[in-house]
Image (tube, helix red, strand yellow):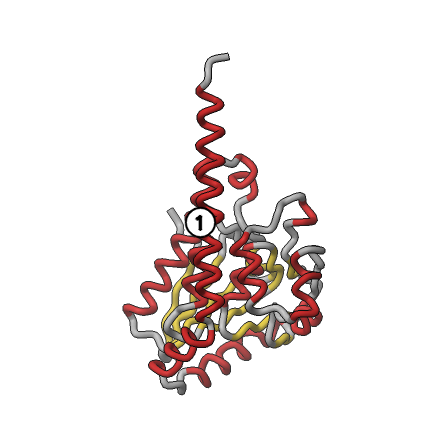
Amino acid sequence: MDSLVGYQLADSVATVTMDDGKVNVLSLRMIYEVSRALDRALDDAAVVVVLAGRPGVFSAGFDLPVLRAGGSAASSMLRAGFDLAERVLSYPRPVVIACTGHAIAMGAFLVLAGDYRVGAAGPYKITANEVAIGVTLPRPAVEICRQRLTPAHFNRATILAELYEPDSAVEAGFLDRVCEPADIWDTVRAIARDLTKLDLDAHKATKLRARQAALAALHDAIAADYAALSQRDLATATAAARPA
Protein backbone atom coordinates (compact mmCIF):
# COMPACT_ATOMS: atom_id res chain seq x y z
CA MET A 1 0.00 0.00 0.00
CA ASP A 2 1.41 3.38 -1.02
CA SER A 3 2.08 5.85 1.75
CA LEU A 4 -0.11 8.94 2.05
CA VAL A 5 2.73 10.90 3.63
CA GLY A 6 6.16 11.65 2.22
CA TYR A 7 9.22 12.24 4.37
CA GLN A 8 12.51 13.87 3.46
CA LEU A 9 15.41 14.95 5.67
CA ALA A 10 17.87 17.54 4.40
CA ASP A 11 20.11 19.98 6.26
CA SER A 12 18.46 19.14 9.60
CA VAL A 13 14.98 19.94 8.23
CA ALA A 14 12.40 17.15 8.03
CA THR A 15 9.73 17.78 5.38
CA VAL A 16 6.49 15.87 5.90
CA THR A 17 4.17 16.06 2.90
CA MET A 18 0.55 14.88 2.87
CA ASP A 19 -0.57 13.68 -0.54
CA ASP A 20 -3.47 11.29 -1.08
CA GLY A 21 -3.78 12.36 -4.73
CA LYS A 22 -7.04 14.15 -3.97
CA VAL A 23 -7.88 16.61 -1.19
CA ASN A 24 -5.78 15.19 1.66
CA VAL A 25 -8.65 14.08 3.88
CA LEU A 26 -7.56 13.51 7.45
CA SER A 27 -8.55 9.89 7.72
CA LEU A 28 -7.27 7.77 10.59
CA ARG A 29 -4.60 6.45 8.25
CA MET A 30 -3.45 9.94 7.21
CA ILE A 31 -3.37 11.10 10.83
CA TYR A 32 -1.39 8.01 11.85
CA GLU A 33 1.15 8.48 9.05
CA VAL A 34 1.70 12.16 9.91
CA SER A 35 2.22 11.23 13.56
CA ARG A 36 4.69 8.51 12.57
CA ALA A 37 6.58 11.05 10.44
CA LEU A 38 6.82 13.36 13.46
CA ASP A 39 8.24 10.44 15.45
CA ARG A 40 10.75 9.83 12.69
CA ALA A 41 11.82 13.49 12.69
CA LEU A 42 12.63 13.22 16.39
CA ASP A 43 14.52 9.96 15.84
CA ASP A 44 16.50 11.66 13.06
CA ALA A 45 17.27 14.63 15.34
CA ALA A 46 15.70 17.02 12.84
CA VAL A 47 15.94 20.59 14.06
CA VAL A 48 12.88 21.89 12.16
CA VAL A 49 9.81 20.13 10.75
CA VAL A 50 7.92 21.37 7.69
CA LEU A 51 4.37 20.02 7.35
CA ALA A 52 2.99 20.53 3.85
CA GLY A 53 0.11 19.62 1.59
CA ARG A 54 -0.03 18.82 -2.10
CA PRO A 55 -0.29 21.52 -4.81
CA GLY A 56 -3.63 23.30 -4.45
CA VAL A 57 -4.67 21.80 -1.15
CA PHE A 58 -3.28 21.48 2.35
CA SER A 59 -6.19 19.45 3.69
CA ALA A 60 -9.97 19.47 3.26
CA GLY A 61 -10.40 18.17 6.81
CA PHE A 62 -11.78 14.96 8.23
CA ASP A 63 -13.04 12.07 6.10
CA LEU A 64 -16.68 13.19 5.74
CA PRO A 65 -18.27 9.79 4.93
CA VAL A 66 -16.73 8.37 8.12
CA LEU A 67 -17.77 11.45 10.09
CA ARG A 68 -21.37 11.34 8.83
CA ALA A 69 -21.66 7.62 9.53
CA GLY A 70 -20.93 8.30 13.20
CA GLY A 71 -20.15 5.55 15.67
CA SER A 72 -16.80 4.53 17.08
CA ALA A 73 -14.92 5.02 13.80
CA ALA A 74 -15.94 8.69 13.66
CA SER A 75 -15.18 9.19 17.36
CA SER A 76 -11.73 7.63 16.97
CA MET A 77 -10.95 9.78 13.93
CA LEU A 78 -12.01 12.97 15.72
CA ARG A 79 -9.96 12.12 18.79
CA ALA A 80 -6.89 11.24 16.71
CA GLY A 81 -7.14 14.44 14.66
CA PHE A 82 -7.29 16.74 17.66
CA ASP A 83 -4.62 14.73 19.47
CA LEU A 84 -2.40 15.38 16.43
CA ALA A 85 -3.13 19.12 16.61
CA GLU A 86 -2.26 19.09 20.32
CA ARG A 87 0.96 17.29 19.51
CA VAL A 88 1.93 19.84 16.86
CA LEU A 89 1.16 22.72 19.23
CA SER A 90 3.51 21.22 21.83
CA TYR A 91 6.08 19.68 19.48
CA PRO A 92 9.62 20.21 20.85
CA ARG A 93 10.95 21.48 17.52
CA PRO A 94 9.82 24.43 15.37
CA VAL A 95 7.02 23.42 12.99
CA VAL A 96 6.60 25.35 9.73
CA ILE A 97 3.33 24.87 7.85
CA ALA A 98 3.36 25.04 4.05
CA CYS A 99 -0.32 25.71 3.37
CA THR A 100 -0.25 24.88 -0.33
CA GLY A 101 -3.93 25.61 -1.02
CA HIS A 102 -7.30 24.93 0.59
CA ALA A 103 -7.36 24.34 4.35
CA ILE A 104 -10.84 23.48 5.55
CA ALA A 105 -12.16 22.49 8.99
CA MET A 106 -9.62 20.11 10.59
CA GLY A 107 -7.18 21.10 7.85
CA ALA A 108 -7.41 24.71 9.04
CA PHE A 109 -7.06 23.65 12.68
CA LEU A 110 -3.86 21.80 11.83
CA VAL A 111 -2.54 24.94 10.13
CA LEU A 112 -3.34 26.90 13.31
CA ALA A 113 -1.25 24.45 15.33
CA GLY A 114 1.98 25.28 13.48
CA ASP A 115 4.59 27.76 14.68
CA TYR A 116 5.07 29.62 11.37
CA ARG A 117 2.49 29.31 8.62
CA VAL A 118 3.14 30.18 4.99
CA GLY A 119 0.24 30.13 2.52
CA ALA A 120 0.17 29.97 -1.25
CA ALA A 121 -1.61 32.89 -2.90
CA GLY A 122 -4.61 31.99 -5.02
CA PRO A 123 -8.37 31.34 -4.95
CA TYR A 124 -8.06 29.04 -1.96
CA LYS A 125 -10.48 28.58 0.92
CA ILE A 126 -9.28 28.70 4.51
CA THR A 127 -12.21 28.18 6.82
CA ALA A 128 -13.76 26.51 9.82
CA ASN A 129 -16.94 25.71 7.90
CA GLU A 130 -18.69 23.51 10.47
CA VAL A 131 -21.55 25.90 11.26
CA ALA A 132 -22.18 26.41 7.54
CA ILE A 133 -22.71 22.66 7.05
CA GLY A 134 -24.80 22.11 10.17
CA VAL A 135 -22.15 20.90 12.59
CA THR A 136 -21.56 22.36 16.05
CA LEU A 137 -17.90 23.31 16.24
CA PRO A 138 -16.07 20.75 18.43
CA ARG A 139 -14.74 22.03 21.74
CA PRO A 140 -11.08 21.38 20.77
CA ALA A 141 -11.56 23.33 17.53
CA VAL A 142 -12.83 26.31 19.52
CA GLU A 143 -9.71 26.25 21.71
CA ILE A 144 -7.35 25.89 18.75
CA CYS A 145 -8.98 28.88 17.06
CA ARG A 146 -9.04 30.90 20.28
CA GLN A 147 -5.28 30.58 20.82
CA ARG A 148 -4.30 31.88 17.38
CA LEU A 149 -7.02 33.91 15.67
CA THR A 150 -7.23 37.65 16.27
CA PRO A 151 -10.07 38.68 18.62
CA ALA A 152 -11.88 40.53 15.85
CA HIS A 153 -11.96 37.42 13.67
CA PHE A 154 -12.42 34.68 16.29
CA ASN A 155 -16.22 35.02 16.39
CA ARG A 156 -16.50 35.52 12.64
CA ALA A 157 -14.40 32.43 11.91
CA THR A 158 -16.09 30.13 14.43
CA ILE A 159 -19.68 31.26 15.03
CA LEU A 160 -20.23 32.62 11.50
CA ALA A 161 -18.01 30.14 9.58
CA GLU A 162 -16.47 32.98 7.57
CA LEU A 163 -14.52 31.93 4.51
CA TYR A 164 -11.06 33.44 4.10
CA GLU A 165 -8.72 33.61 1.15
CA PRO A 166 -4.96 33.59 1.85
CA ASP A 167 -4.50 37.37 2.10
CA SER A 168 -7.41 37.86 4.50
CA ALA A 169 -6.31 34.73 6.38
CA VAL A 170 -3.15 36.60 7.43
CA GLU A 171 -5.23 39.39 8.94
CA ALA A 172 -7.42 36.84 10.73
CA GLY A 173 -4.47 34.89 12.12
CA PHE A 174 -4.74 31.65 10.15
CA LEU A 175 -1.49 32.42 8.31
CA ASP A 176 1.65 34.43 8.98
CA ARG A 177 2.67 35.07 5.39
CA VAL A 178 1.47 34.55 1.81
CA CYS A 179 3.58 34.15 -1.32
CA GLU A 180 3.09 33.07 -4.89
CA PRO A 181 2.70 29.30 -5.33
CA ALA A 182 5.89 29.15 -7.40
CA ASP A 183 7.81 30.71 -4.50
CA ILE A 184 6.34 28.84 -1.56
CA TRP A 185 9.03 26.20 -1.25
CA ASP A 186 11.89 28.70 -1.50
CA THR A 187 10.16 30.79 1.16
CA VAL A 188 9.48 27.83 3.46
CA ARG A 189 13.04 26.53 3.14
CA ALA A 190 14.48 29.95 3.93
CA ILE A 191 12.32 30.24 7.05
CA ALA A 192 13.21 26.71 8.14
CA ARG A 193 16.90 27.44 7.61
CA ASP A 194 16.66 30.51 9.85
CA LEU A 195 14.83 28.50 12.52
CA THR A 196 17.62 25.91 12.68
CA LYS A 197 19.67 28.62 14.44
CA LEU A 198 17.36 28.65 17.47
CA ASP A 199 18.41 27.15 20.78
CA LEU A 200 16.14 24.11 20.86
CA ASP A 201 15.97 23.77 24.64
CA ALA A 202 14.93 27.41 24.95
CA HIS A 203 12.46 27.00 22.08
CA LYS A 204 10.79 24.00 23.69
CA ALA A 205 10.60 25.54 27.16
CA THR A 206 9.29 28.86 25.86
CA LYS A 207 6.71 27.19 23.61
CA LEU A 208 5.32 25.18 26.51
CA ARG A 209 5.32 28.24 28.78
CA ALA A 210 3.69 30.52 26.23
CA ARG A 211 1.05 27.93 25.32
CA GLN A 212 0.49 26.48 28.78
CA ALA A 213 -3.05 27.82 29.17
CA ALA A 214 -4.01 27.03 25.57
CA LEU A 215 -2.66 23.48 25.79
CA ALA A 216 -4.44 22.84 29.09
CA ALA A 217 -7.73 24.14 27.64
CA LEU A 218 -7.25 22.06 24.49
CA HIS A 219 -6.45 18.91 26.47
CA ASP A 220 -9.59 19.33 28.59
CA ALA A 221 -11.69 20.08 25.51
CA ILE A 222 -10.50 16.91 23.76
CA ALA A 223 -11.36 14.83 26.83
CA ALA A 224 -14.81 16.46 27.15
CA ASP A 225 -15.70 15.96 23.49
CA TYR A 226 -14.48 12.37 23.44
CA ALA A 227 -16.47 11.56 26.60
CA ALA A 228 -19.60 13.08 25.05
CA LEU A 229 -19.09 11.17 21.80
CA SER A 230 -18.48 7.91 23.65
CA GLN A 231 -21.65 8.41 25.68
CA ARG A 232 -23.64 9.12 22.53
CA ASP A 233 -22.19 6.04 20.78
CA LEU A 234 -23.12 3.92 23.79
CA ALA A 235 -26.68 5.27 23.81
CA THR A 236 -27.02 4.61 20.08
CA ALA A 237 -25.71 1.05 20.43
CA THR A 238 -28.03 0.36 23.38
CA ALA A 239 -31.06 1.66 21.49
CA ALA A 240 -30.16 -0.48 18.46
CA ALA A 241 -29.88 -3.58 20.64
CA ARG A 242 -33.37 -3.20 22.12
CA PRO A 243 -35.99 -5.57 20.71
CA ALA A 244 -38.50 -3.96 18.38
Residue 176 lies left or right of residue 86; in this view the side is right
- Disc 1, SS: helix
Q: Residue at x 69, y 67 (%)?
A: 153
Question: Residue at horizontal 61%, vertical 63%?
Answer: 101
Residue at 49%, 73% (x, y): give it: 115
Q: Which residue is mark 1?
A: 79
From this view, report whether residue 60 is shown above or below residue 231.
below
Residue 209 visible somewhere in the drawing: yes
Is 120 situated above or below 230?
Answer: below
**Is residue 119 found left or right of 41 in the rendered image?**
right
Residue 22 visible to an observer of this rendering: no
* Residue 144 figure quarter: bottom right
Q: Quick check: 101 left or right of 198?
A: right
Q: Quadrant of residue 73?
A: top left
Residue shown at 55%/68% (left/top)? 147
Q: Horizontal and vertical percent for residue 50?
A: 45, 70
